[in-house]
Structure formats: structure tokens, C-alpha cells
Image (spheres, rainbow, N blue to C red):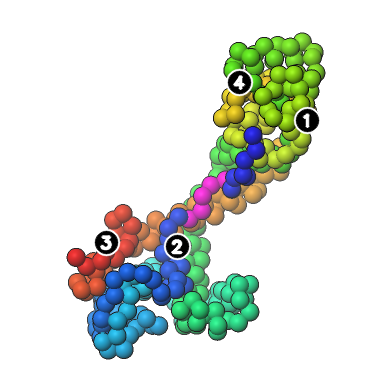
Amino acid sequence: MIRARSGGYRRPLRWLCLMVLLTLGGCSGEGESMATSEGDLVANVNGVKVYMADLEEISPEEGQVVERVAFEERLLSVVITQLILTKAQEEFGIDTEQEPYLTAVEEEYRELRDQVAAQSPDYEAFLVEQGITDQRVRLVAAQRAVIAQVGNELAKDVPEMTAGEVEEIFEANRVRLTESVCTTHVLLETREEAEAVLERALAGEAMTELARQFSIEPSASETGGDLGCLPADAFVEEYGTAVVTAELMTPFGPVESQFGHHVIVVTDRTELRLADHAESIRAEDAELRRSLAIEEWFLSVASESDVQIEPQYGTWTTEPTPQILPPS
């Protein structure tokens, strides 16, 4: 009857962050290889030419063979970087080479270094192991600083939640928010059996004795059906949903789950108050709306931009998401 706990109110930004963080991905990979020349023109992004040398650490010596998967991932990250940085400056005046963005980039860079330090005390060795350079880490820092500021600009036009919307999310998340609920149950195979046990429980028979006598739960003879006090989302969905709103000390059911039919009594529960959660709901929703606004902005930028990939390296497309298709 117990399951793994669930996550937050809603899912965060979907694929954009993953695309941006491709710039921190390693350059090793399996797949077809290709020979290139260091001076080759690779792409043209809104009039800005991208050469093989711009692909940094996987830029090969003339005639060197590089793995196609690594090349395509790096090229995609360079194209996305160019789109983000140029459009952010064009639309919002965000220039990572000027203040206050220089400071913001340094802060992001230090945070990335701290994240690396949490995994490996030797920063340089970590970079070598991952096949990346410090220059690329700094590029990601610039991306993150720009995206954060773009989000701040877009958030100015994002409406705040209404009181009704806050309450709706609160009610929809009662199971996740209920930190402790104490229950005893009797588990039966059929609904008819459960209804008969419920009738006896409502007539005053002790739930523990009914569980020991009738429950198909293996441990019921020892526990008397007492599941103790657990977070509501530790239970299977049907059980958790039922126990967060049930009247205390009153047997109810049957509640059907994958295990059978439950007759339940809630003996205690931490009660929820909207006032205790409204602020966090608003904050999480604001971050979600901000993230979605960034995603919509980038998709618009990607679809409206002029991106030309040299045919031997692939084809740019924005359907279903911005990506570079391998050459045919």
C-alpha cells in the first residue's frame, strides 16, 4: 500500500534547460565519425558565421576524425548560444560583456565551479575527464546569466495567480502537502466483503479485531491493520486521496486500489491551512510561469531566426523542437 513519494506542484521548464546545458556535455560518444578541416564554415546564424574553430575543444586539426554525435551536440549548443546571446541583446539590451552582466556571469561561473567541486575536488582533472574546457564552463555561465535576466524581463508581463487559482492548486495538492496521516484499515478481496466489514465497523466493532479476522493483508494478524502515521503521498494514490479528507475516527469505504478493497479509519492527521501554503504556491507558480515564458521566447526566437547549416554537417529545424538533423 506504500509507494514512493511524488514531486512538486508541477513540472519545471522542460527541454530548454537541457538544450542549454548541452554545452557542459562531454565530447565523447558513439556513432559515425567524420573528417573535417579546421577552417571550414559550419553554419550561419542570423548573419554570424560559425567556423569549425568555434566549436572549441572538439575543433580538429586538419584531416582529423571526430565523432559525429559529439560534433552535432557541440554544433547545436553553439547555434543555441548564438541565438540566445544575440536576441537577448537585441530585444532587452542584455550584453554579457558589460555591467551588470559581467558580475552576473562571474557569479554564475563561481556557482558552476562550486557544483564541480561537490563532485570532484580537482577542477582541472574534472574538465579533462568530461572532455570540456574552462572556456566552455564560462560560456555556460554567460548563458545562465542571460537566461536569468531574460526571465526577469519576461516575468514583468506574467500575471500573478488569483486567490481562486491558489486555492485550486492547494486542493489539488492535499495529498502531497499532508505530512502525516494515521490510519488503520481492513483489506478485502471484494467490494461486497468490504461493505459487510464496514457495516460491522460502523456498528461499533473494533477495526483492529476486524482486520485480524478478515483482512487479506499478510501482516494484519500482527498489526491489526494499523499502518501507523505516514505522509499521505506515501500511500497508493486511491488510499492517499481518501484519507486526506476523511472524517477522523469514523470508518469509511470501500476504497478500491490495486491491492483490493479497503475499509479505513483515520485516527489522526496534520490538518492543512491554505494560509500556510499560499506563499509557496504563488512562488512556485511564478517560477513555472517565468520558465514557460522563457521557453516560449526561445521557441519564437528559434523559429524566426535565419539559421543555415552547411549541408555536409546537417540541417536546422525547429520541428518538433530546435535541432540539427544529420545530413542525408
Q: Are marks 1 and 4 in contact (CB under 8 Å)?
A: no
Residue depth check, mark 4 versus mark 2: number of the one nearer the observer: 4
State how far apart marks 2 and 3 are (Cα). Answer: 17 Å
Q: Residue 90 versus residue 177: which sits nearer the camera?
A: 177
Which tag, 1 or 4, sits closer to the chain's start? 4
The quadrant of the picture occupied by the C terminus is: bottom left
Spatial CA distance of label 3 from label 1 is: 60 Å
Q: Which residue is mark 3?
A: 317
The part of the chain drawn in magenta is: 8-13
Q: Position of residue 302 (x, y in %)?
A: 32, 63
Callout 2 crowding tier (Cα within 10 Å): few <14, some 14–19, many ≥20: few
Q: How far apart are the two marked residues, 1 and 2, measured between alpha carbons?
A: 47 Å
Q: Badge 1 local density, few (<14 within 10 Å), some, or many (20+)? A: some
Dot 4 amino acid type:
Glu
Counting residues from the start of the chain, the first of labels 4 and 2 encountered is 2
Q: Amino acid at mark 3?
A: Thr
Identify the mark nearer the N-term, 1 or 2.
2
Residue at image position (59%, 17%) is: 190
Q: Residues under labels 4 and 2: Cα distance?
A: 46 Å
